[in-house]
Amino acid sequence: MASLFPSEEWILELMEVVNQSGDYAKAAEKWEGDLNFIVEPGPGLPKPACLYMDLWHGSCRSAGLFPIGEKNAEFEISAPLATWRQVLDGKLDPIMGLTTRRLKLKGNLMKILKTPKAAIELVNCARQVDTRFPA
């Protein structure tokens, strides 16, 4: 059954996919950093959600859904639900989203741009999660 995006169930499923992905492990072997993915409120999502991932050298050490501000991550990427859906549906490249500011970043963009394949593989993993969106 599909997991609701954004939810604790969804981010934990993504953590499993990431930890089983050889492609992600290879692409992110030099990546160190944790991220907050902020989903801004909109239709079907009355309040913002914060999905957290602690990514370390090709694996995910922890993940979860937390109140905004509870996890102080190195990176914060925020966007409306509709924009996240475009990323997960393959209609918006994550690097293009960051450079055009459709995905708003707090953190060092140059660090992300040094390992763009890691970001792409993370999104490829997210696309493997059976996902449903709020109505």
Image: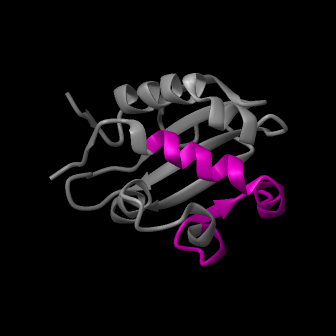
What range is drawn magenta here?
Answer: 98-126
How far across and how far down the image is residue 8, in percent?
39, 28
Residue drawn at (56%, 30%) of the image = 18
Comparing 30 with 50, the one in front is: 30
Residue drawn at (58%, 41%) of the image = 69
Q: Quadrant of residue 132?
A: top left
Residue 87 falls left or right of residue 52: left
Q: Is residue 105 above or below residue 70?
A: below
How far across and how far down the image is residue 73, in percent?
69, 40
Q: Is residue 90 above or below residue 58?
A: below
Is residue 52 found inside the magenta-colored segment of the image? no
Is any part of residue 105 visible from this angle? yes
Q: Is residue 68 above or below residue 71?
A: below
Residue 17 falls left or right of residue 54: left
Secondary structure, magenta segment, majority class: helix
Is residue 115 found inside the magenta-colored segment of the image? yes
Q: Residue furthest bottom?
A: 100
Comparing 75 with 94, the one in front is: 94
Residue drawn at (75%, 44%) of the image = 74
- Quadrant in which the N terminus appears: top left
Q: How many marks do you count on the picture? A: 0
Residue drawn at (21%, 49%) of the image = 134
Q: Residue furthest left?
A: 135
Comparing 87 with 44, the one in front is: 87
Residue 38 falls left or right of residue 47: right
How far across and how far down the image is residue 15, in percent?
52, 27
